[in-house]
Image (tube, coloured by chain):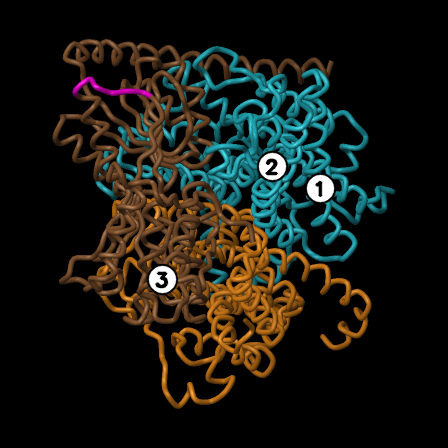
Amino acid sequence: MKKTKKWLALGLALILTMALFAGCGKEGEEQGEQQGGQEEQGQEEKTLKAAMITPQKLGDDGPIDACYAGLQAGAKDFGYEIKVLEPEAGEYEDSIRSMCDDGYNLIFCIFSQMQDAVSRIAPEYPDVMFVQVLGDLEMDNVKTINYKDQEASFLCGLAAATMSKTGKVAVIAGAPVGDNVRNIAGFEAGAREANPEIEVTHLYVGSFEDPTKGKELANTLLDEDYDMILQVCASSSMGIREAVKERGTDVCMIGNCVDESTAIPGQVPFSNFSDHNKTVYSTMKEFAEGKFEAGVVNWGLEEGMTKCIFAEDDIMEVPQEVKDLVAEYEQKIIDGTIVPPAELEEE
Amino acid sequence: MNFEFRQNPINVRTALAAIFIGTLIGFVMVTLFGYNPVEVFATLLKGAFGSAKNIATSLRWATPLMFTGVAAALSFRGGMFNFGIDGQLYFGSLAATIVGVICTGVPGIILIPLMMLTSMVCGALWAFIPAFVRVKLNGSEIVPALMMNYVAIHLTDYIVHYYFLASGTNGDSLKTERIAEQAQFSPLASGYQLTGAIFIGLFVVLAFWWLMKKSKLGYGISMSGMNPTFARYGGIQVDRMRILVMLLSGALAGLGGAVEIMSMRWRFESGFAPSFGNDGILTALLGSSTPLGTLIGAIFMGALKSGSLAVERYTDVSRSLATVIQGLIICFVSARLISKYIGFDKIAENLSVLFHFNRKAGEKDA
Amino acid sequence: MLDLGILGVTMRMATPILLAGTGTLYNDRAGVTNITLEGSMLLGGFFAVACSFFTGSWVLAALAGIATGIIVSLVFYFLTSICGGDELVVGFSMNVLLDGLSIFLLKQIFHQSGSLVDERIVGVPQISSEVLGGIPIIGDLFNGQTWIVYFTFAFALLTWVILYRTPFGLKVLACGESPQAAATVGVKVLRIRFICNLIGGALCGLAGVQISLGFLSLFTQGMTVGRGFIALGSVVFSKGNPLRLIAVTMFFGFAEAMSNRVQLMQLPSELVLMLPYLAVVILTFVRFDRLKKIKGMKDQEAC
């Protein structure tokens, strides 16, 4: 008797919960339908809606902000409606799906963490175009964009080794992952090219969003007389900036992804630039003009999407011979006489 | 420091009152920053229950919390505070993934239970260390359990990076290869995120109910949790119960991770389970560590998560509003006197004790 | 690799842990289980940065951090002692809550998600002098640190004096050892605990200031990365003795400092990052093992 009572209670509770859900569900569906109707009306003019989904937060003054700037510029010039989502790990699929459901037809998925989610969702929404930044997806409605980071970082390594007074240069990267490894490999090869005697090393912060650790690592390097540090760690680089700034003008930081020369005036001679801004903007342009093409692209120095970008002279003067050397090697890489390595040498 | 933990039973009224007060404070916070609270909370509700798809999403987020929630509830019932659920989940699910990646030739009917078993064993192993510290070394289980979360996260990263990294650009973000196809759950309906995992979750809750209500072991567990001294007199080996509870709790946490991987991710990736452990603890606390309470708690937390994602998408309000509300609710659930209607005179009395008299002080501690 | 420069880093890394630990030590000795360290530090750090952003003064910022810590501890005290909440449960959920709150405020006030970086944020200045730097070892330890570092170590030593040599300290100890007995001889248990709670909160807030404005001059979400819990662990290991607490926290500071150095040797970064946390787990074993053997001796000592 007691048993049955309990089962009954449990069953009742379950039914009640279900009923509650069902009730809410109906109401919501109606609303959803209404919204759907509105959307259909709007679609006659083909609305342009672009969403950007990023695993790292905005405000890194690096790749993510560059993408966002591109997105905003695109929205302004081509009349897109835009939205940025910053989901945590594990929520990517949710976010992408909801953007598809909301009628966004161009979706930028930043960095390779998103690949799995994109590969699963893309077939379900054939009308939505996806742009995967960094990855190797080959699907009908996905454009995958990669950079040959090693080419620009090779030039940075070259310049850094030439400018270094102590003969020690280093990279601080976020984590041992693809684009970071390409950057490190290129930088180390470039540095050795300029000066075979150079001491070059790399460290990992272990996170792209931990400036405290970034600063401690930078300080550790500076204590060991490293005087040129390339950062490849998004938000963690805020800590590196502070460490370099506090140390004074004898040491320099090399920016990444964007031109960081104004971040610490006089201490960022050049930056390892990859044009996320232009990538996003030009893709939006293509899409607006109906020229969007799916497929994998791999951009480097030749396309001008990565480069070693020098500070303006009034911010920091870089010796002309360094610039000449970089220009010389830039030509060599474009010609194909030098191929910077994309993978680390085993030590 | 006193880390002895004994959960006070919570009645439905207290929980509802706490939810009400927590939400009210959330309302005020939103209003203070100049947003329309009705709009924000309507978005939250719509995101949680607005459509069949949203309900499915809520249940999808509730599923892992059923595992971690029961894991936490079980440890609370046995008088342990398992703070290390996240670590156990990570460690267990990595082990299961490795099995899933290596045994590609094994049929699904064997592989799936094998993966579950592996995750449970490894989760339990991870939970054994804090249990050992508590029982054999007479220390507190809380600190080592907490620290082992961080250890597990870094250690799994290391193992993935150096031994099981996916080929190609997928490896760029510390992922393993996909597990064998026969172990991948597919969604119950296309376009929905809900998989058969929810039934496993419900089964776990049911098993928890059976354990606590029907079995002798469950009686031993709750006795040693409620009153260890009394339990010892009653011939229950409290120490053994404590270790057992932690092992079971760790096993469930590991299982939750493995099921999440089989149903949603199909591979282990760094940071794939955002705060499932903590949310599981909150779930158990909200549900008063009872099976039904935990189930409802899990659905509530899942809905809140799904709703908060919607809030972030459609309004300018941060999604951590939901985290704040969760925290507030549990605070008020625990601070019973607020949530009880009659509590205010008692609060006033306590305040007066603090500032004027010390008459009651000794009594209170007794 | 093991030059004396590491001493300075050790001090810097040990400071927030020691500071929060000292605060919690008062709670511990008075019999209050307050585990909100992590949350207080985080929110304290946040408000310090926010205050620095708006006023441009690090003094006000530090005060804001301390005030935040005090408010957090007041809320904790209200929910537990006044409203009958369970200390562990309230502590745990307040950690969740405060973490969420810092992100919420960051987004709502500054419209940033992730981190707050701005030129207007002023860090706590570092004090360096030629004279101090000239002294071996001492110079390495103390030169170029923020005043919070000096304050922390001075206060930790002072805590030893307060606890064991002043009437107030004895009352605190009595509250922790046997509240009923203390109440019978006229110690106002609740009030003593209240004061200890406030001290704990204030110091945790200041620890947050050291992390956000002492190490750096910015705020990132979750920037305490478990330091609060490490501090909690240190208090447990040191059995509530301030001197032992200094030693334990210095050990953790050293572990963190080492983990930066060790990376230069190209060890796997994941294992290196694990070091400080693993150190806590291992210490759990070491300490309790020893404790059991000489438990009798300890008990006598305590009397």
Q: CA distance from mark 2 to mark 3?
A: 35 Å
Is residue B358 one of those drawn in magenta?
A: no
Q: Chain of mark 1?
A: B
Q: Which chain is mark 3 on?
A: A
What secondary structure is found at the residue carrying circle 1? helix
To which quarter of the image does residue C26 belong? bottom right
Q: What predominant SS class does the magenta segment belong to?
A: loop
Give the mark nearest the N terminus, 2 or 1.
Answer: 2
Name the residue rendered at 49%, 41% in the picture: B330
Q: Are marks 1 and 3 in contact (CB under 8 Å)?
A: no
Chain B, colour shown = cyan
Left or right of C253 in this view: B303? left
Which quarter shows the N terminus of chain B? bottom right
Q: Position of residue A287 (x, y in %)?
A: 22, 22
Q: Which residue is mark 1?
A: B246
The part of the chain drawn in magenta is A289-294
Asked whether the residues under the numbered discs 2 and 3 touch, taking CB atoms below 8 Å apart as contact, a structural biologist would say no
Is residue A113 something that shows in the picture? Answer: yes
Q: Give the residue pinned by disc 3.
A: A161
**Which is nearer the eye, C231 or B325?**
C231
Label 2 sits on residue: B164
Neighbour tally class for label 3: few under 14, some 14-19, many 20 plus, Cα within 10 Å:
many
Question: In this picture, is C1 found above or below A190?
Answer: below
Q: Which chain is orange?
A: C
In terms of depth relative to the viewer, which is nearer, B196 or A64? A64
Q: Chain letter for brown? A: A
Label 1 crowding class (10 Å Cα cut-off): few <14, some 14-19, many 20+? many
